[in-house]
Amino acid sequence: MKRNRGMEATPQEKLFEYLRQIIFEEEPQSIQIKELPEDLRDLGSGLQLLDLWMGEVKRLSLALSDGDLDADQPRPDNVLADPLKSLQATMKHIAWQAKQISKGDYSQKIDYMGEFSMAFNDMTLQLSEKQEALEKSRDDAIKAKQMLQEVMDGLERYFIILGEKDQRVRYENDAFRKLQAVDPKFAEQLKIQTCSGISGPREMKRKWEIEIQTEKGDGQQGNRYFVVDANFLLWNEEPVIACIIEDISEERRKEQKIQEVAFFDALTGLHNRRYIMAILEKWLEEADPFVVTFIDLDNLKFANDEAGHEEGDKYIKQAADLLTSVKGTTEVARIGGDEFLLLVKNCSEEELHQELEEKRTKLFQMGQAENAFYLKSFSYGIVEADSLSSSRYRSELLREADKRMYEYKMKNKPRIKRSTEEKL
């Protein structure tokens, strides 16, 4: 029955309106229990309790939706809020589990929330597997680093690790530490020389040689040679340069000895035929004027036959010493038993002739001073490289120089050789 305007609502209608507000409105208007009939007062009191409980449920729901898991819980007798209170407790536990996971505890699991539990547990399982892989990788890296250090400490070669940015030492192996203890100055010099070779754009690998001058025990200067093999890598998660430094001084000395055998005469220390012929070819290609001189010692066979090769060797070395002091840009070599070849730049044929005569006289005087039983002297033939009109070929130059030497020897032969009777 439709109520006429102005008519007062019945108590039942007031209670129904109160219930509607409790359900649908945020702040329902409460009713006055005393205004209700006696038989409706218990229902009114029940609705007021429902209003109180629903308010607590709404406030907790709003707090949870905002992420406030520490919001005040409804009163204990609010049975309507029990599911929310259980949800709040669950969410707080999940939040705590998430914090534990963030600290690396991947053992956390949820067993009572359906698909969410499956997703959560699958996530923690994957994180746990990744963590195990990372730990294994880290352990492997630590073991590899320890093994590398043990290997490097067992090497005779020097091994240092330098920071890529500041090139300060991050690690030195046992061999390098021993070097520092024995000769700190040299070790520092070696380190500086190594750093100086690290320049230019970053490369995966570089290799170079360094040479360091050192003092021998007798105060003389010597050289030591090293090859540096550098690799760019990570060391304790820092970009570094690992340098293996190998002493190749002995190899260089062996190479020098081989070169001496290949290009030097063992008796005189002069260059040998192979070397001087290469220089002759080079000078001919350069087309600069120079003088070729073929020199032959007089009476060497006589000295060897009469007094032995020891006397002959002495004679050869005396002549070699004199020829090394020829003025100008000079290359001199012993090309045979009693033969020498002299190449001289910045000197005319006449100037060289005069100087060789002086040296020939000096050699003769040395023999006289020694009271040698034979005349010490040499014969020579001089050819200017540009004096041949046909060509500048080596064989022609040498042939002409040999010819002139022979002519000189024949011309001076009466004054060169003593008789065997004079020796006696």
Image (spheres, rainbow, N blue to C red):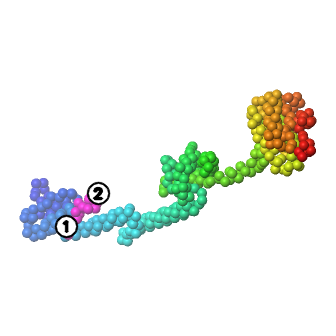
* Residue situated in front as seen by the camera: 283 or 122: 283
Inspect the magenta stretch and tell me whether residue 70 lies in it.
yes
Q: Which amino acid does label 1 sit on?
A: Arg
Q: Which mark is residue 75?
A: 1
The residue beneath circle 2 is 66
* Residue situated in front as seen by the camera: 118 or 156: 156
What percent of the width, then of the height, locates residue 409?
Answer: 90, 36
Q: Which of marks 2 and 1 is nearer the N terminus?
A: 2
Q: Quadrant of the N terminus?
A: bottom left
* Residue situated in front as seen by the camera: 14 or 222: 222
What percent of the width, then of the height, locates residue 195?
Answer: 55, 47
The stretch of residues the image draws in magenta is 57-76
What percent of the width, then of the height, locates residue 8?
Answer: 10, 58
Identify the residue at horizontal 82%, vertical 36% (top origin). Answer: 360
Q: Furthest-front residue in view?
A: 424
Identify the residue at horizontal 71%, vertical 53% (top origin). Answer: 254
Disc 2 is placed on an element classified as loop
